[in-house]
């Protein structure tokens, strides 16, 4: 996991954060460990706890961030959630 975090961190810092700060919406698709590493960076989850975070296959997840890139809410989307047009 440490190696994955090392590879994901520059993408978060140099690509995703600037796009989000500019008001863009960003869609990230990746392997489970890459997504886990990104969530670890955003939420500051401890190394010992991040391995317990379940990332469902093909299960959309919405992260709402504040202007300082801090997590406001993480929502796992599924069939019982709102329509995509209501979310976006």
Image: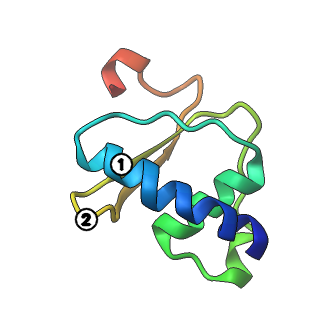
The answer for how far apart the CA atoms under marks 1 and 2 are is: 11 Å
* Labels 1 & 2 near each other (Cβ < 8 A): no
* Res 15 label: none
Point out the frontmost of discs 1 and 2. Answer: 2
Q: Secondary structure at mark 1?
A: strand
Give above or below for 15 relative to 38: above
Q: Residue at x 25, y 50 (%)?
A: 21
Q: Quadrant of the C terminus?
A: top left
Q: Which one is nearer the viewer's eye here, 78 or 24?
A: 24
Residue identifier under label 2: 68
Residue occupied by mark 1: 64
Characterize the local packing of mark 2: few (<14), some (14-19) or many (20 or more) Cα atoms within 10 angstroms: few
x and y, in percent, of residue 68 in the image: 25, 65
* Residue in front for this viewpoint, 27 or 81: 27
Q: Percent position (x, y) of residue 17?
A: 37, 54
Q: Is residue 1 visible?
A: no
Q: Quadrant of the N terminus?
A: bottom right
* Figure label count: 2
**Position of 66 compared to 28: left or right?**
left
Q: Name the quadrant containing residue 9.
A: bottom right
Instruction: Between residue 46 and residue 7, name the one nearer to us.
Output: 7
Q: Considering the numbered disc 2 on the image, is that residue within a helix, a strand or a loop?
A: loop
Residue drawn at (32%, 61%) of the image: 69
Residue 78 seen in the figure: yes
Query: In the figure, is residue 37 to the left or right of 57?
Result: left
Q: Residue at x 32, y 21 (%)?
A: 86
Question: Residue drawn at (32%, 46%), measured in percent from left and top?
Answer: 20
Question: Can you tell which quarter of the image residue 65 is in?
Answer: bottom left
User: Residue 18: image x %, image y %?
Assistant: 33, 51
Q: Residues within 10 Å of mark 1 (few under 14, many from 20)?
A: few
Q: Nearer the viewer, residue 8 or 83?
A: 8
Tell me where residue 10 appears, x and y as whole percent. 54, 62
């Amino acid at each position: 996991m440490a190696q994955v975090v090392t590879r994901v961190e520059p993408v978060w810092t140099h690509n995703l954060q600037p796009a989000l700060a500019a008001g863009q919406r960003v869609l990230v698709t990746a392997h489970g460990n890459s997504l886990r590493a990104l969530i670890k960076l955003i939420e500051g989850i401890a190394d010992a706890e991040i391995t317990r975070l379940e990332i469902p296959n093909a299960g959309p997840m919405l992260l709402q961030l504040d202007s300082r890139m801090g997590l406001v809410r993480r929502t796992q989307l599924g069939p019982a959630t709102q329509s995509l047009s209501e979310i976006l």
